Image (cartoon, grey):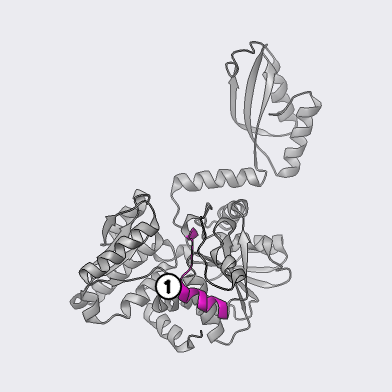
């Protein structure tokens, strides 16, 4: 299925005055690391913290005045909810005669911060169901009961075209890029960006990136038809969907150059690199495009990584950063058993100091095993400079006769 370039251009004009500019950022660090010329498209800096405002606004703005007065409804656990709520608010501010009420059905598992953020944008929030699928079913029921207009998170042509305006912006700034990596959940973003770039007759390759534990489109392409995964398991909750939309999949099949999957460890590494090196906060799903760099042959090529969103709460980002530090060998946690006598802790401390490992956490537990009165367990976390440094610390401890638990 092809979408005329004119439709993306019209959407771009519609969105021009409401979007925040998200100009490409050249990454010297990633370029050197992967021996390529790498740019970041920071949609995590967009209004509401993700690309979702584009599709939501384009869809609602395409409705007639009469349709808007019927009210709009959707289901979402996060970014789409805020996109729809803001789009309705902006359109109401622009024309009070065709104001629309926005109702968002959110599952009970939705973090309170996301519920409150959606309500602050003027939407009515209904909490229903244990997961997105149950919230979605309730939203569709309310759609028919009240005659509202449903705004699908991804499987809608106007939504897809709105997301595709990102592709035109990338072409405007970097028309000679070889590859664009795009995170994939339901598939609306990937379908839109790929279709827009194809409609402009560009030879740029668009590659979708999914988590290994939620690779629905990758599996669907292997099967040659749209399939539903039995379960999903990924830290990238924003793209943890069991199946894409049929419209999205049809467009993806005709426009996307390839798919690649990223491990949870790879996502954590990407998240950490974005925070530490680029000073950009991304949610796990948003970092997928950067995680793809180590899984694809990009050497010598010009690459754009679309960072799709940055809505992540502080507790989660703290946890993700610490996990990322561990996976990159920047934090090392270990345990050893010591004789229960003075001076034993000092011996371990001396080994760590000699190897320039900075202790950040230490627990000296003499009650860990009541049947062993002559030993204590020492749990230690140290700051390290990478895997090679960790190996030196381990070797030194083993050489000293300590058994690392």
Residue at numbered disc 1: 155
Residue 250 inside the magenta-drawn segment: yes
**Figure check: 159 above or below 279:** below
Work out whether residue 51 or residue 382 is closer to the camera in this orientation and state it.
51
Q: Position of residue 100 (x, y in %)?
A: 23, 71
Q: Is residue 40 visible?
A: no
Q: Which residues are magenta?
A: 239-254
The answer to whether 102 appears left or right of 389 in the picture is: left
Q: Position of residue 136 (x, y in %)?
A: 35, 62
Local crowd at mark 1 within 10 Å, few (<14), some, or many (≥20)?
some
What residue do we see at 66% from left, 60% from top?
29
Work out whether residue 214 or residue 351 is closer to the camera in this orientation and state it.
214
**Figure check: 220 above or below 264:** below
Work out whether residue 208 or residue 308 is closer to the camera in this orientation and state it.
208
* Quadrant of the image occupied by residue 80: bottom left
Q: Position of residue 351 (x, y in %)?
A: 74, 27
How many numbered marks are there? 1
């Amino acid at each position: 299925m092809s979408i005329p370039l004119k439709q993306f251009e019209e959407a771009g004009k519609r969105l021009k005055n409401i979007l925040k500019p998200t100009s490409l950022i050249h990454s010297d660090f990633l370029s050197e690391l992967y021996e390529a010329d790498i740019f970041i498209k920071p949609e995590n800096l967009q209004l509401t913290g993700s690309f979702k405002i584009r599709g939501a606004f384009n869809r609602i703005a395409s409705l007639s005045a009469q349709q808007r007065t019927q009210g709009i409804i959707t289901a979402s656990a996060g970014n789409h909810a805020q996109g729809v709520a803001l789009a309705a608010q902006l359109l109401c501010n622009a024309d009070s005669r065709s104001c629309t009420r926005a109702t968002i059905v959110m599952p009970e598992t939705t973090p309170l911060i996301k519920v409150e953020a959606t309500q602050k944008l003027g939407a009515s929030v209904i909490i229903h169901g244990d997961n997105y699928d149950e919230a979605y079913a309730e939203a569709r029921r309310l759609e028919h009961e009240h005659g509202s207009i449903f705004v699908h998170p991804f499987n809608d042509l106007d939504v897809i075209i709105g997301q595709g305006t990102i592709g035109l912006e990338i072409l405007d700034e970097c028309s000679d890029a070889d590859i664009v990596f795009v995170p994939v959940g339901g598939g609306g973003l990937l379908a839109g960006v790929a279709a827009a770039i194809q409609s402009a007759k560009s030879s740029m390759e668009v590659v979708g990136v999914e988590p290994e534990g939620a690779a629905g489109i990758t599996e669907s392409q292997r099967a040659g038809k749209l399939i539903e995964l039995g379960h999903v398991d990924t830290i990238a909750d924003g793209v943890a969907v069991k199946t894409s939309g049929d419209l999205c999949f049809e467009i993806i099949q005709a426009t996307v150059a390839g798919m690649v999957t990223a491990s949870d460890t790879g996502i954590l590494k990407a998240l950490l690199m974005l925070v530490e090196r680029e000073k950009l906060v991304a949610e796990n799903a948003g970092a997928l495009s950067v995680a793809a760099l180590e899984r694809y042959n990009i050497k010598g090529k010009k690459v754009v990584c679309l960072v799709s969103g940055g809505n992540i709460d502080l507790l989660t980002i703290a946890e993700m950063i610490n996990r990322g530090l561990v996976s990159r060998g920047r934090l090392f946690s270990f345990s050893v058993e010591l004789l229960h006598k003075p001076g034993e802790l000092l011996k371990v401390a001396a080994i760590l100091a000699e190897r320039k490992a900075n202790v950040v956490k230490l627990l000296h537990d003499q009650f860990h095993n009541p049947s062993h009165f002559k030993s204590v367990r020492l749990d230690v976390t140290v700051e390290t400079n990478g895997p090679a440094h960790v190996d030196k610390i381990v070797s030194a401890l083993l050489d000293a006769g300590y058994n690392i638990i």
